[in-house]
Amino acid sequence: MKKLDLIKIVSYIYIALPLAFFIFGWTKIYLIGAPLTIAIFVSLYRMAKNAECRTFNIIESKKDIIKIVIIITIILLWVYFSGIGGYTWQNNDHKWRNEIFEILIEYKWPVVKGTAYGSNGMSYYIGFWIIPAMIGKLFGVNAGYFAQYVWAVIGVSLVYLLISKKNEGLYIWPLLIFVFFSGLDIIGLLLRNNDAFFKYTFGMHIDNWAVGYQFSSFTTQLFWVFNQAIYGWIVTLLVLDENNANMVLVMAAGLFSAPLPVVGLFPMALCRIWNNSAKDNHNGISGIIKKAFTSLITYENVIGIISAVVVGSMFLSNNAISYTALAGGKNNVRNLVGIVVLAILIVSVVVLVRRNILKGKQYRRIEIYRRIQKVSIIALKMFCALFIIYGAIHTIPSKNSGTMDNNLLYYILFLLVEVGVYIALTYRIGKKDNIYIASIIMFLICPIFVIGSSVDFCMRACIPAQIILYMYIVMRIKDLVINRNKMVIAVLTVSLLLGSVTTVSEFARTINNYPDYKENGIEYARKEQIMESMNFCSSVDDSIFYKYLAQY
């Protein structure tokens, strides 16, 4: 009997169940709800049946049992300190998430409510809460909050197990590095010309030292935006090890719970599709493209496309996205520049791959690709000039005037502080991996885009790239154990320790504010604030989803 990869199967179930129950509970039952839900479960069965068994043996000795106890304890404590479930003090963003969760429990699905401006329907990424909210509907709000905590623990455990699969073993240290991994925010705080560094105390939120740009640590993601982070982590790790037959459905399931991370994952997913198609292919580029196309046409991926259309119809009606489209001015300039640069860099990666394939061969058309590469370099220079010309694309608070025009130097400083050292330390072992190169490109691109009125895209779309960079840091550490390089070991150790200050501060803030939690409990936004907010809802009259697909 064929052995199944249980870690991958449970991960599939974890990301697909919320999507299936959302479609069943929110869309027209006979037209979409029942048929598409059944189709998703059939897809899950097919994916599970074909999951390759590459799972390592979790328990091989008594030492492994002790190791497992330590790992479970770390995960339980990490999720507890995040505030998920409401068992300790929570960061500010939780008040919105608490109210969204209770609305999902109290209101009939799909959630629609009359406001002073007409009827609004929820159009937020609610995937994380679907299963806990169902439990809350059955057994009460408190049971729902407990289910949130359990659901988060399961999700984080799956993240760890997927990482362990990559590492081919159960180790504690990769988990600790994951918990404490961060950019060098404390250095950024020092380099910024203000007093914040000298007034620093444990408990400060320092991920946002570069106002206008932000790459959050994994702990910050869990403590603030767990609903996107956990699913973003899982989907990224699945895609890095996924075959083409399931790729679209995995991405669609992730889109429902973590849309911005999935957008950021898209270039890496394309690279994975390319790599899968290039294996044992001797027919050049055209053969790879043909194989990629045919391998993507599967039952699972067709269901994934349909699911993505349903989910997308809800998200695209979201007023925050509408705000981005209609805001005009500087945001549109910034987005346009971002799109141009993304296109240029994708072309550059294709050229790089093409030249590697043709390396050592006499091929006339290679000169064309060399010219494209030269054009890409010229275009990048133009981008730098545009960045300087449009230096005031958005403003950044400074110590004195309250604003400081953004510029290329600030952008470069941000990237160097957040990921520059880690990229320098891992580039040697990652430079031939197009997924690694794509992650670097996403680090360059994410700060340029704006969705809505905040820097959410920068903070969330970079999550897959952060996961990939983290995986390469782990690989670098394993390499250094064998090939000792004292200088590299010292730089990496210092960098990880400096980065961990961000995580320690997140834990410290929870501990410092615990007395306030004991006295006042957890915070909630008002229902009106949720149902009238452009970030969470949209007008049912203007929504394709609510007009044609929803069952209300």
Image (tube, grey):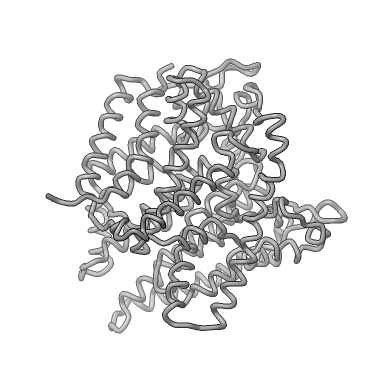
Residue situated furthest left in the rendering: 1
Q: How many marks?
A: 0
Which quadrant of the figure has residue 355? bottom left
Which quadrant of the figure has residue 213? bottom right
Q: Is residue 543 left or right of residue 356?
A: right
Q: Is residue 493 left or right of residue 265?
A: right
293 or 419: nearer the viewer:
419
Q: Is residue 209 left or right of residue 355?
A: right
**Percent position of residue 215, x then y:** 60, 55
**Percent position of residue 416, x then y:** 63, 68
**Percent position of residue 229, x then y:** 51, 46
Residue drawn at x 40%, y 67% as measured from the top left: 434
Q: Is residue 526 visible?
A: yes
182 or 84: nearer the viewer:
84
173 or 357: nearer the viewer:
173
Q: Quadrant of the C terminus?
A: top left
**Percent position of residue 454, x then y:** 65, 44
Please say if 548 is above or below 227: above
Please say if 546 is above or below 480: above
66 or 187: nearer the viewer:
66
Residue situated furthest right in the rendering: 400
Residue drawn at x 47%, y 55% as measured from the top left: 464
Q: Is residue 262 visible?
A: no
Please say if 447 is above or below 491: above
Residue drawn at x 59%, y 56% as measured from the top left: 337
Residue drawn at x 72%, y 30% as measured from the top left: 519
